[in-house]
Amino acid sequence: MSELRHMVQAVLLDRDEPVPIKARRLVEGVVLGHEGSLEALVRLVDAHQEDSSLYFDYFSQVPTGPTRSWCRSDPERAALLASILARHLVSDSWGDRDKEYVSTPLAFLHTVLQALVRDNNLGHAQDLAADFFAADVHWRNQEQRRRSLEWLADLQAPADRALAPVLGARTDVVEYYKEPGWQARSVVLGTILAGG
């Protein structure tokens, strides 16, 4: 009976908990390896897709290991929610957050994109790539640009052929990543991005 009472209290607390406090608690749970925390956080951000602060301040702080596992188990949802974060980065106010902090959501997006490619979920990777590249260009964070170019330089078939049309579709993206002397394993990516 006392266990049932505890469960009912937990449900009531969870229902009345403000979204930012719940998000913070769930991110801490993910970091500490608490089972179910990541799925609960994913449900929360999915239910509040319009809340950019939830995406900026909490969702993007999920560590790399759990992010990769989640992408493997639920690639479609991972691509969708990451794309929403990327679009928030382009269209929503950054507020009074430190501009350097943008490297956190950009790195999170990059981790999701890399995981989708590595697991050969190339259709979902294409869906996310357009939004990721747009966010990367929008913020012009040089550290993320370097990471993006290093990753693109290592891509091989079939991933390079999947991402090349997305990369080449916008001239501002091509111009942002173009770099004289840039060497890529992929001929098609090298052709798009090696500047003269």
Image (cartoon, helix red, strand yellow):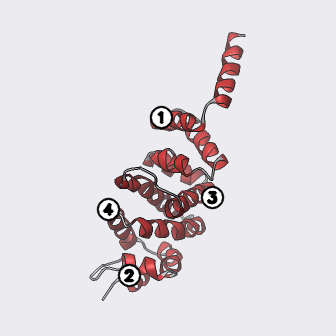
Q: CA distance from mark 1 to mark 2?
A: 40 Å
Of badges 4 and 3, nearer the viewer stands 4
Instruction: Name the amino acid type tagged 3.
Output: Glu
Q: CA distance from mark 3 to mark 2?
A: 28 Å
Q: Which mark is residue 76?
A: 3
Q: CA distance from mark 4 to mark 2?
A: 18 Å
- The one nearer the camera, 35 or 172, is 172
Viewed as shown, does residue 130 lie left or right of 155?
right
- The one nearer the camera, 6 or 175, is 175
Of badges 1 and 3, nearer the viewer stands 1
Name the residue carrying label 1. 28
Marked residue nearer the N-terminal end (3 or 2): 3
Look at the image and tell me in which quarter the C terminus lies. bottom left
Viewed as shown, does residue 189 lie left or right of 182?
right
Q: Which mark is residue 143?
A: 4
Marked residue nearer the N-terminal end (4 or 2): 4
Name the residue carrying label 2. 193
